[in-house]
Amino acid sequence: MLESKACKNHKISQIFSQKEIAERLEVLGKEISKDFMELENPVVIGVMKGAFCFMADLVRNISVNDPLQIEFVRLSSYGSATESSGKIQTPYLELPNISRRNILVIEDIVDSGRTARFFMDYLTEQFHPRTLKMACFLDKPSRRAVDYQPDYTGFSIEDLFVVGYGLDYAENYRELPYLGELSLPD
């Protein structure tokens, strides 16, 4: 951990700097570009709100033959808590007809795996994609409650509660340009 910042009596210890994130996304973008380069009509679906920074930076690092169609959904299992509730909320799950397309889902974090598994199953059942892959900014394999492994991972982390770079605590700290561990007062 590099530096700490105190906000609203919360301590945030930096885990990955803005530079480290940018360097990792450049590599990740090349991996995805290689896999999607020749695929027709790729669709990228960002899971809001947490993936917005990751998605914006990642798609700028993806280079493929056909233009990317960008879509968004909103799913959640955290609410304002620091752990997944286990219940998937779908406040916005409207998508155009993307049947039989090549789909890349962009997620902020795969923790328990419930939200990822739910959404990937939903896309498979509704749209029967030709290709369906997921890129996540963070993977927490130690927290897995269901069997799910993302296809592309920015970083694997221990069981920490993190904020910044799109991730929040009670809708705060998404704007931080780095990823940090949040320590709440007792």
Image (cartoon, grey):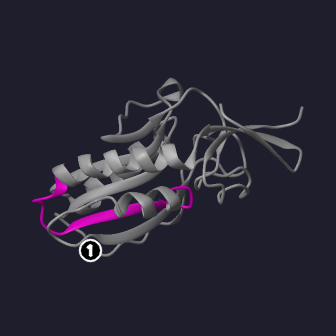
Q: Position of residue 110 (x, y in %)?
A: 47, 40
Q: Position of residue 85 (x, y in %)?
A: 63, 41
Classify the position of the C terminus by image quarter.
Answer: top right
Classify the position of the N terminus by image quarter.
Answer: top right
Q: Position of residue 143 (x, y in %)?
A: 53, 28
Q: Is residue 33 left or right of residue 161?
A: left
Of the pair 2 and 12, the residue shown nearer to us: 2
Q: Is residue 86 left or right of residue 23?
A: right
Splitting the image into 4 quarters, where does residue 162 fall? top right
Q: Residue at x 49, y 46 (%)?
A: 21
- Furthest-bottom residue in view? 96
Task: Note whether 54 is above or below 72 in the view shown.
Answer: above
Q: Residue at x 39, y 57 (%)?
A: 58
Residue 40 drawn in magenta: yes
Q: Is residue 129 left or right of residue 135?
A: left
Q: Can you identify the residue that label 1 sits on?
A: 97
Q: Residue at x 26, y 59 (%)?
A: 103
Task: Note whether 87 is above or below 177 in the view shown.
Answer: above
Secondary structure at numbered mark 1: loop
How many discs mark residues in the rendered view?
A: 1
Of the pair 112 and 16, the residue shown nearer to us: 16
Q: Which residues are magenta?
A: 35-51
Q: Is residue 73 left or right of residue 121?
A: right
Residue 15 drawn in magenta: no
- Furthest-left residue in view? 38
- Label 1 sits on what residue type? Asn
Q: Position of residue 172 (x, y in %)?
A: 73, 57
Quick one: label 1, few (<14), some, or many (20+) residues within 10 Å? few
